Amino acid sequence: MPTKIDKVIVTNFSALATKYSKDGLSKIEQAVSALIEGDKKRGLNSLYIAVDDATAMKKLGAAPVLSAANRKQNKVAIDEIYRALGPDYILLLGSVDVIPHQDMQNPMFSPDFAGDPDRYAFGDLPYACSQPYSRRPQEFIGPTRVVGRIPDLTGSNDPAYLLKLLKTATSYKQSTPDTYHAYFGITAEVWKSSTRQSLERIFGNADGMHVVPPKKDTWAKPLLARKALFVNCHGNANTPYFSGQSVRDKNHYPDALRASFVDGKITAGTVVAVECCYGGQLYDPKFAAGQPGVCNVYLGNQAYGFFACTTIAYGPSSGNGQADLICQYFLRNLLAGASLGRASLEARQKFARESSMGNPVNLKTLAQFNLYGDPSCVPVQTVDPKGPPPPRTPAKGVTWSMVDRVERATRRRSLFLEGSAISATRPTSRETKQPLSRSIKTLLQNKAREFGVIAEATKSFVVRFPRRIKGMPKTLIGEKLVPSGYHVLLGRDKIVAKARRPKAKKDGKPTEPPAFTRIVALVAKEVDGKVVSVTRVYSKSKHSAPGAKKALS
Amino acid sequence: MAEIKGQVVKRMFAVGSKSEREAVFLVTKKDLYLLRQIGRNPYKDPELEQLVGKTIKAKGEIDDYMLLLSDWKVIED
């Protein structure tokens, strides 16, 4: 049988050369060779290839990347590598200044900073998709490839960090499922209801949930040593910590997890899912007084995988949605014995299949969550080596690695078909500048009034349908049943603070409880010209109500 | 390093997301920047809060929609 390439390790030599000395590059080369050797022992044929290596790319019938920062060239190069070799794993080696994230247009972007200020949702999702280069996330709702990234430090000239991560990937060891079920969960107090639900869905209980405040970020070592971490807190751009938030004091954002504090206290093999805004932003540490972000620090402490997003994230304060879901899916797949890369691909597919891709908030979520870590690493050992022999054994003359390769290929074909089916059948949306119809505007205004929401801005999206599937009854895709658009109203929600209801006055009459506001997005689903439902995506924090209040436009 | 003149204001940021909060911005004739000081708490920076309502000449690095302040001078109260 021909030797199949199971895994490609993709980098850019010239980009690495601008960061590191000759000696540094030589050490990186040696560390990659050790990783390839380690992969071989696990039955994986790995190939190291640079997208700017004209000779190597030519052998694959591919054009080399001429400018490391050129996103289109990088996307085309990785597509061509995948087409030529069909690897089961694509490992991007280096940070965003070696192989850039793709800059997908953020459908929630609002030039008015009251809305979403991210012009782009940065991510590696397009590298996981067969669709050609585009900046529209709508083109990438059906990922088919297993992709992960081992980043070096953005802007760094010291290869030590990257060498450490390569060593972790080379020498990783599996652990039993029990090891990963004893988890550490951190949540902002305002989101504890949502986090509880997430943890119950992932681990079967919320016993490991820690709420900030009242808890503080000076976590005991045994907690930090747990090998699964789930965080639902605030995060910021270029910021090396995540923050909690108090229910009672809306302006109290205590630190919940600091990169500098956890450094040196993490157990090798830890896996992490982080919902926080910018939780997976690979920022240049110079923007944070030299302190790398939480993601970089975990990976530098031999965490095997870190699943997180690059910009502002969304999710409800109670119940689950967006960031909650994609993080849940990732960890659940991992606990079931998937590789980091497959856990990530299956999480993306499940999210794209089960959440409306017409909803711009969901689109942004899918676009910006990424896996950091070696995609071929399988942290959880599902077969007990001391237990009875597995039901399947290799035939005479066939190696275990061949058996695994055949099984993996079956899974990859299935995942490819699944991603292709999602692309072909799921509706997406595009923003429209057309003014809202009078009836929808009135309904949204009424809903806003009913929910006590003071409207600030709206955005509208038209749903774009894929081709009709042969055999599907017309009634299933009739215009009276299928959403034709989404309208997002961003505003403030005036609510009553029951938890702090003051005592009655001396005259016996109860005083009015204090009111405060929290920010909400109302997402209205339009079917056949009418709004059929309005979903409140609650803000993850609360604010007092100063500032200009614009009328709903 | 950029040098930008503008008025400091406080307003809502990233409404409806996990990042929404009241934040301090620099408004120039053309642009709007979220103001941050490197190494300071992005949620509460009393130094920046004191600048609200004032016109300043700011020095710092622009990172997308943020101005990472390294220095400033109040030119108008």
Image (tube, helix red, strand yellow):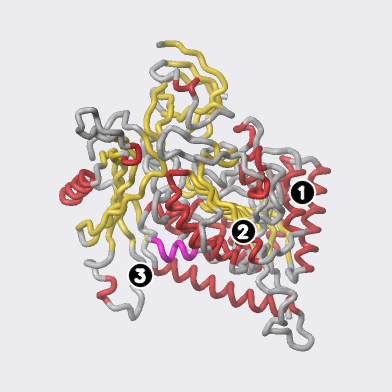
Q: Residue A294 carries which label?
A: none
Same chain under badges 3 and 2? The reply is: yes
Q: Circle 2 marks a residue in which chain?
A: A
- For the residue pair A409 and A18, the one nearer the viewer reads as A409
Image coords of residue A123 (percent x, y):
53, 51
SS class of the residue under badge 2? Answer: loop
**Which residue is pictured at 36% across the width and 58% down the height?**
A358
Image coords of residue A74 (percent x, y):
60, 53
Same chain under badges 1 and 3? The reply is: yes
Same chain under badges 2 and 1? The reply is: yes
SS class of the residue under badge 1? Answer: helix
| Residue A376 makes an appearance in the image | no
Say which label, 3 or 2, has the lower sequence index. Answer: 2
| Amino acid at pointer 2 | Ala
In the image, which residues are magenta? A349-355
Quick one: quadrant of the C terminus of chain A? top left
**Which residue is pictured at 23% across the width and 59% down the height?**
A532
- For the residue pair A67 and B37, the one nearer the viewer reads as B37
